[in-house]
Amino acid sequence: MKRPRAACKHSDIITDPSTYPFFDLLPDSQERLLNALFGTVTHFFGGFRRLFSEVTDSRDPRKVSYPVAALAFTGVLLFLCHLGARRQIKLQLHSLASAVTFEALLGVSSIPHGDTLNDAFKQFNPEDFQRVVSHLDHMLIRKKVLYFSRVLEKYFVVAVDGTGTVTYSARHCSHCLTQTRNGKTIYYHNVLEAKLVTQNGFAFSLMSEFIENPGENPTKQDCELKAFYRLAPRLKAAFPRLPILLALDALYACGPVFQVCTDHDWKFTIVLTDKDLPSVNEEFQALSALQPSNRLSFHTGKNREVKQEFRWADQILYTDSAKTEHTLHAVECIETKPDRHGKVASSTWKWVTNLKISKANVITMANDAGRRRWKIENQGFNAQKTGGYRLEHAYTTNPNASKIFYYLLQIAHTISQLLYNGSLLGKTGRKALGAIRNLALRILEAWRNATLTMASIERITQLRFQIRFCPDTS
């Protein structure tokens, strides 16, 4: 589907950035890499100053040396450059060239120390930074950047799942979750994420809900499902009109989750295992036998070597423990394909959904909705844990500052994905970089050695250009 073009009559729009040396990324073009970075942020979000302009500064103004934007940008740069620890800010980000760029960008002559960030973040409200994270998605959706990723030309797929962040051998705060094995207790923190995921690999954080105990000795620990019931109204409030299709794992196959989705006017695909919802599984098997027309074979892969067999059943009535009735639809996919040794292997997936299944949409519902849930694991959590962001590193021991560092990581991950896949780097730039994690090293090199003046920063804000993504989805 053709992506709508932004309405603009200016003659200075760069429709093909590769023809203009301002964005040409070559091995010695560190300054142009910074231009591409700041150009991407300015194009989509108005620049770093504007991005953090709504964060409330509760500090004593007489003791403030760095504005909020300078502190937040430094935190984002910590993750963009994959520094891995707060102390690396002083060791890696400080140079004569970077000081000039920092002043031109944020109006401050020196880069703050990592401890300065920590002390300030203790005083800020984490929800202000959550709103910044959500704002990124608002702007991408508003600018129709993600319209190509919609399922059935309407729904944005939002995967929801929990993951661990930090683990301690001793209690570090009153909100720690605990787990005891073989007489040994560990203390840890988890977070529930709602990420907008696309078929070409984007995974953008929409909303986060921290899974934490209210005190040291709770009668029941917090858990992923409880966090979902808290996250849902917040997600609806932040994106009230966004047509959402939730992609969830089997943990969420229960009546209360079905009701939450109904109340918020959300669609869903939820993994259904043979152990979950016995009555739904039995009804699915019975109806499938009576509805031979509800079957479809599909071949895919480069050489059509992958075979998928679909079967589905509609109008399955399910009554939950609260005596609430739900109308569900179920679809099963059996995929057969050769492995790397040529041996044929089969895999089976099954989902329940509140969208009616037909031959016209069954392939889309299975492959582009149900199975897309894995992108929150691969492009989301795994990228942030093993791809250089070090999600599981304790950047601070303060609970409040810890949440803000987490949000800044999400912001950096979004910007990195947009920059690497965007057309400002061009094919030459991506080829020179190789893997996306190499982008962090190149940004760090450019930040330390290249110099951007106030004039060049202003030039970026005045240029009008388009950014398309690789592969081109327009």
Image (spheres, rainbow, N blue to C red):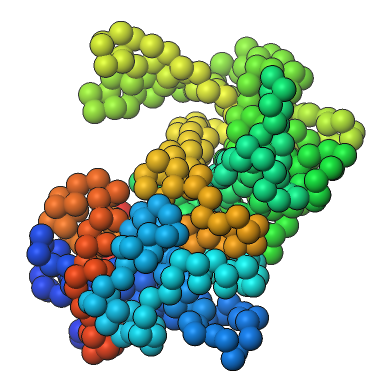
Q: In the image, 193: left or right of 408?
A: right
In the image, residue 354 sits, relative to residue 172, either above or below, namely: above
Question: Residue 389: horizontal and vertical position, in percent?
Answer: 41, 50
| Quadrant location of the C terminus in the rendered image | bottom left
Q: Is residue 241 visible?
A: no
Residue positioned 74% across, 18% down in the render = 278
Q: Position of residue 457 (x, y in %)?
A: 28, 83
Looking at the image, residue 396 lies above or below residue 166:
below
State the image quarter where residue 128 is shown: bottom right
The image shows residue 157, relative to residue 76, as above or below, that is above
Decide if residue 301 is in sight here. Answer: yes
Q: Residue shown at 63%/86% (left/top)?
A: 60
Q: Position of residue 416 (x, y in %)?
A: 35, 58
Asked whether, in this view, residue 375 is left or right of residue 440, the answer is right
Q: Residue at x 51, y 55 (%)?
A: 395
Q: In terms of image quadrants, where is residue 81?
A: bottom left
